[in-house]
Image (spheres, rainbow, N blue to C red):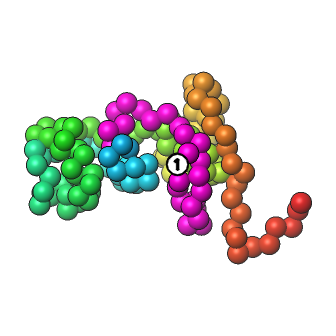
Amino acid sequence: MVGVLDQFGNRHTMPDVKVPDQIKFLVNAVGVESTLSFIDSVGGRRIWVPTTSKNSRCAQVYGDDIAAALSDEYGGSHYDVPLAREWRALLFYSQGMTMSDIASRLGCSRSAVVRIIGGRTRKIITHRKLVQQDKRQMFFFC
């Protein structure tokens, strides 16, 4: 189980979702939340990774932990940051996000998200939590 923040800033545990091989080193080094944030901001781009991360531009832009992990794995070369759409969609879905919200966050159509969640990734089992309620609001239906 992995802990993540929902849209209201509450921490929730969620089922493990298989991490793609391309980003497994990042998840192991910095965790799911930091990897997700990095991919959300840079996914689909090619970045230069220095051989040493200390005091590098990479460390200034992405943070010391991510820069160190990238340098260890791809130092001295370019790294094509994957979009990891299936992984991100499953993470967002297991957090209780709606299909439309997931589509907006991934930059694709709602029907593409439906295909990802229910189609090709059917073998990956996720136990979707019910949509988290804002704890500041009353729950009217039992």
Q: Quadrant of residue 116?
A: top right
Q: Amino acid at mark 1?
A: Val
Q: From the viewer's perspective, is 84 left or right of 113?
A: left
Residue 6 placed where, x, y %?
58, 59
In the picture as drawn, the residue positioned furthest to the front comes out as 1
Q: From the viewer's perspective, is 34 left or right of 12?
A: left
- For this rendering, which residue is in front, 109 or 53? 53
Identify the residue position indicated by label 1 in the image: 2
Q: Where 97 sits versus 45, above or below?
A: below
- For this rendering, which residue is in front, 85 or 5? 5
Q: From the viewer's perspective, is 120 left or right of 132?
A: left
Q: Is 27 in the magenta?
A: no
Q: Quadrant of residue 80?
A: top left
Residue 18 visible at all: yes
Which quadrant is home to the C terminus? bottom right
Q: Element at badge 1?
A: strand
Residue 103 visible at all: no
Which quadrant is home to the N terminus? top right
Q: Is 14 in the magenta?
A: yes
Q: Residue at x 44, y 53 (%)?
A: 33
Q: How dense is the environment of label 1, judged by Cα within 10 Å: few (below 14), some, or many (20 and up)?
A: some
Q: Where 18 sits versus 50, above or below?
A: above
Residue 46 placed where, x, y %?
24, 41
Q: From the viewer's perspective, is 129 left or right of 39?
A: right
Q: Which residues are magenta?
A: 1-26
Q: Residue at x 58, y 29 (%)?
A: 124
In the picture as drawn, the residue positioned furthest to the bottom comes out as 136
- For this rendering, which residue is in front, 77 or 4? 4
